[in-house]
Amino acid sequence: MLRIRPYKSCDAKKIVTWHKDEKTFLYWGGNLIGSFPLSAEQLDDMYMKKNGLCEEEDNFYPMTAFDDDGIVGSFIMRYIKGDKKSLRFGWVINDPEIRGKGYGKAMLQLGFQYAFEILKVDKVTIGVYEDNLPAYKCYQAIGFHKGGELEDHYEDVLGEKCKVVELEIRKEEWQR
């Protein structure tokens, strides 16, 4: 059974092994989180000491997904510019050995439950590179859709302009 819990420093050693190449790494966290290859110490520093680069102190929630065999995924949640009614998911990654088996969907569904029922937000947003089709399809399959105030934009990934599509889901849509 899949569950989520707050990230612990010991999780970093496994999470950093899931970035098999620089493009996967950049699609996951861009240049914000560090450089490829990322060390466990760099990830832990970003999560535990740098508050995920969030300005507000109580604004950054790194989460770890685990099952009976250990940790299998990770993502972060953060409020959008102090707005306690809007939450952003990001830095979503699963162990490559279990990709395509529904773990990403299940992990983010648990994230929705945490966001809507515990944190009491009205909506959750996420950005995804348009050509990162497995992630894009996963997010759409669990209810994320285009809309809202955030506009799509472009970022440089290894010298290529890549479109970041902004998606959202509202609490009432999730409850259906």
Image (cartoon, grey):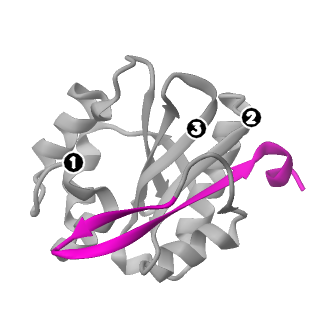
Magenta residues, start to end: 152-176
Type of amino acid under label 3:
Leu
Q: Magenta span has 171?
A: yes
**Which sits earlier in the primary sequence, circle 2 or circle 3?**
3
Q: Nearer the viewer, mark 1 or mark 2?
A: 1
User: Between marks 2 and 3, how big is the CA–CA gap?
Assistant: 13 Å
Give the side of residue 68 with respect to residue 40, left or right.
right
Residue at 69% over, 66% down: 142
Most frequent secondary structure within the magenta stretch: strand
Residue that label 3 marks: 87
Q: In the structure shown, which secondary structural element does the residue marked by tag 2 occupy?
A: helix
Residue 147 rendering spot, x and y as whole percentages: 69, 57
Alpha carbon of mark 1 to alpha carbon of mark 2: how far?
29 Å
> x, y (%) of residue 140?
65, 71
Between residue 98 and residue 111, name the one nearer to us: 111
Few, some or many residues within 10 Å of mark 3 (<14, 14–19, 20+): many
Q: Can you say whether 6 is above or below 22 in the image?
A: above
Q: Residue 33 bears which disc, if any?
A: 1
Which amino acid type corresponds to the residue marked 1 in the rendered image?
Answer: Ile
> Which residue is farthest right?
176
Residue at figure coordinates x 19%, y 54% from the top left:
31
Give left or right: position of 60 versus 112.
left
